[in-house]
Amino acid sequence: MTDSLAIRLPELKGKAFVLAAPERGRMVIQAVSPEALTIGIRVKMVLADARALHPALQVFDFEPERAESLLSELAEWFLRYTPVSVIDLPDGLLLDVSGCTHLWKGEESYLKTIVCRLEKRGYQVRAAMADTIAAAWAVSRFGRPGDIVAHRGQLEALLSLPPAALRLESNVAGRMQKLGLTRIGDFIGMPRSMLRRRFGQSLLERIDQALGRSAEHLEPVVPTAEYRERLPCLEPLRTRKAIEMALEKLLEGLTEQLLHGSAGLRKAVFRCYRIDGKIREIAIGTGRPSREKLHLFRLFSEKIGSIAPGLGIELFTLEAPVVEPLNAAQEKLWNDGGAHQCAEIGKLLDRIAGRVGSDAIHRYLPDEHHWPERSIKEASSLDEQPSTVWPKTAPRPVYILPIPEPITVTAPVPDYPPMVFIYKGKVHQVKKADGPERIEREWWLETGLQRDYYRVEDENGARYWLFRSGHYENGDAPEWFIHGFFA
């Protein structure tokens, strides 16, 4: 808090000042600047006593809600370093950096980067890293700043720290001090039954958290969506018609925001806050950016029936957590269709996704590879354009198996197509065949046998894509596989 105030008021730099608030009829110090700390002024000191030590001490009002607001802002800023950032009131942040540090070439570089960035912004920083939340908290506040506790080295790092480093209640820490237990190492090896009897179960829980014996869960911050609408109700609403009217009102405001921001949403979340404290929500997704109110309402309307209003809903919110740029005239979806046709295709796919799930819809593009498994790729969006054209000289199946499956064949040698093949226990008599089409391995990626592909049709008119791996040579019979199915 004092760092934030010094950033906003540069004239305070280098001066002793405190933040104070009334407590039991007295003004008590809640936050201290580094300069005030050096002259003996501490948190929870009575303001009158502090002024006796330093008559020129500057005093400002302590605003607890401002501390939470500042930490929330910093927690969101830290999302560029980790996906899990948690507020630790009154003056800390907890970061789960698992799997992140390698992007900064190690833990030391990662920690140094974070500390330097905060210090450049004007903040005094004490930071540490450990396997557990509790151990990192303890070392950062009571140990040597910048320490990185070795893997499974929590116990050794905690031994020399005071009991308060375990985040104990003040009365428990006070009793320990009176008994001469000034370091965690003085009591952590004592029988657990004795510690529980003298200091309570909470002490054992804190020890277990610090040593990693019990889990400690984090509630990460969730950034507020840039595009968000809110609608409170004078009276609780319970009917579907009322919910639809609220949704229409919110969509009107949200689409107006998107229009001003030249953006379209790819995901939207509609939340209903009931008077019993429970929250009901439904979400939709679109295959391409959209801000068309009627289309979005239709997507939501198919899910409104799943909302249970209970005793009534007192607040509605609608937010777009995922948006993309959207100009007045979007690019064509495919080269052979107009913009209107493409928009209608996108709406149709959105409605299908709303019913069966977006995972059931895939769009594929040709890729610049000869090997069949690598010759196609899944498009990231409906607007992505292919980097190459689909092959026309060598037709490919509508459905290609991700992994070719072995079959048993009867075939003349060396290069004739099979006359009969057995796939999953069923015998197929080949009536027509075309091939072989030889596809060599991409030697710059891998080595192995080439493949000879055949397009065959069985007695029922079904067509398949089969291949032989290798040659008939030295008396060895090559393996045969099925790789795809034609329409």
Image: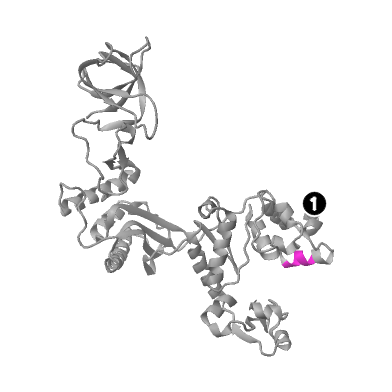
Q: Determine whether, in the image, residue 242 is placed left or right of residue 194.
A: left
Q: Position of residue 99 (x, y in %)?
A: 53, 50
Q: Which residues are magenta?
A: 170-175
What's the residue at 31%, 59% (across, down)?
324
Q: Verify whether residue 174 appears in magenta.
A: yes
What's the residue at 53%, 78% (across, down)?
7
Q: Determine whether, in the image, residue 263 is placed left or right of residue 43.
A: left
* 312 to 478, vertically: above or below: below
Q: Position of residue 311 (x, y in %)?
A: 43, 60
Residue 23 in view, yes or no: no
Q: Residue 205 or 392: which is nearer the viewer? A: 392
Of the residues shown, which amino acid type is indicated by label 1? Answer: Gly
Q: Determine whether, in the image, residue 444 is placed left or right of residue 259.
A: right
What's the residue at 81%, 50% (across, down)?
191
Q: Residue 394 or 319: which is nearer the viewer? A: 394
Mark 1 falls on what kind of element?
loop
What's the residue at 19%, 60% (across, down)?
329
> What residue is pinned by disc 1?
189
